[in-house]
Image: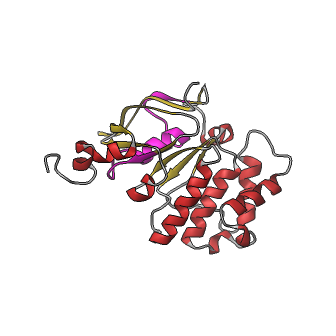
Amino acid sequence: MPPLLQIGGLSKRFGAVVVADAISLDVPAGQALGIIGPNGAGKTTLFAMIAGAVAPDAGRVVFDGADITALPPERRCRLGVARSFQIPRPFGGLSVFENLMVAAEFGRAEKSANPARDCVDILDQCGLADLANRRAGALTLLQRKRLELARALASKPKLLLLDEVAGGLTEDECVALVALVKSIHATGVAIVWIEHIVHALLSAVERLVALHAGSIIADGIPRDVIADARVAEIYMGIPADA
């Protein structure tokens, strides 16, 4: 079976700065993949190219057997690529439930027979049922992050791109959010997760990729990637010969 996501030779530069240098990466269906790297490594730009917000200078993105390199973000969403943002962006004037309904009605290729029922189920899954009628702009940070995941799920994704969802949370809040991500992965959704809070990432992913200067420097079992001398030196600031 071919991978769900195939990235082939993706390259991107902004002026003289290379943020993606011929990156190639396959993600099988149902896999939870983590991506780490220092600021400026190219992580968010890679996400933006997968989601369609940034056009690559070279290379292609293949999703579920179809070349989606030229498709806009909304078309990719309807094909099954959902993305969360580091800073949650709900429709602040709408209720939590209404935010999900927007995604369920406009983010799917195939309309649900009962989108409202689907949204109620997702609210339960994401721990937001008691907040269904609250205005999204009045939520706490953890609640907004839960809503960000819930909205992504309402589009019925095959692939969920998570951009530093643990950032800004307390340790207890981080544990709760990781549990939610793991429950989403258990349903069969493939996950690609960028995160600076490495212990959160390691508790949820089965594969880890390290980026540096727009290139992959390590890819494999999380504990092996973390132990890699190049990762220790570049990402953690520990000399390779220490």
The boundaries of the magenta stretch are: 34-62
Question: Residue at (77%, 50%) from the top-left corner?
Answer: 105
Question: Residue at (53%, 55%) from the top-left corner?
Answer: 85
Q: Nearer the viewer, residue 42 or 161?
A: 161
Residue 201, compared with residue 134, is above or below; it is above
Q: Nearer the viewer, residue 28 or 7?
A: 28
In the rendered image, is residue 197 in sight? no
Is residue 137 found inside the magenta-colored segment of the image? no
Question: Residue at (81%, 46%) from the top-left corner?
Answer: 112
Residue 201, compared with residue 135, is above or below; it is above
Count of marks overlaid on the render: 0
Q: Quadrant of the N terminus?
A: top right
Left or right of 63? Residue 26 is: left
Residue found at the very far left of the displayed protein:
241
Determine the image quadrant of residue 80. top right
Where is residue 94 drawn, in percent x and y? 72, 66
Left or right of 165? Residue 113 is: right
Residue 124, compared with residue 43, is above or below; it is below
In the rendered image, is residue 75 in sight? yes
Where is residue 167 drawn, in percent x and y? 45, 63
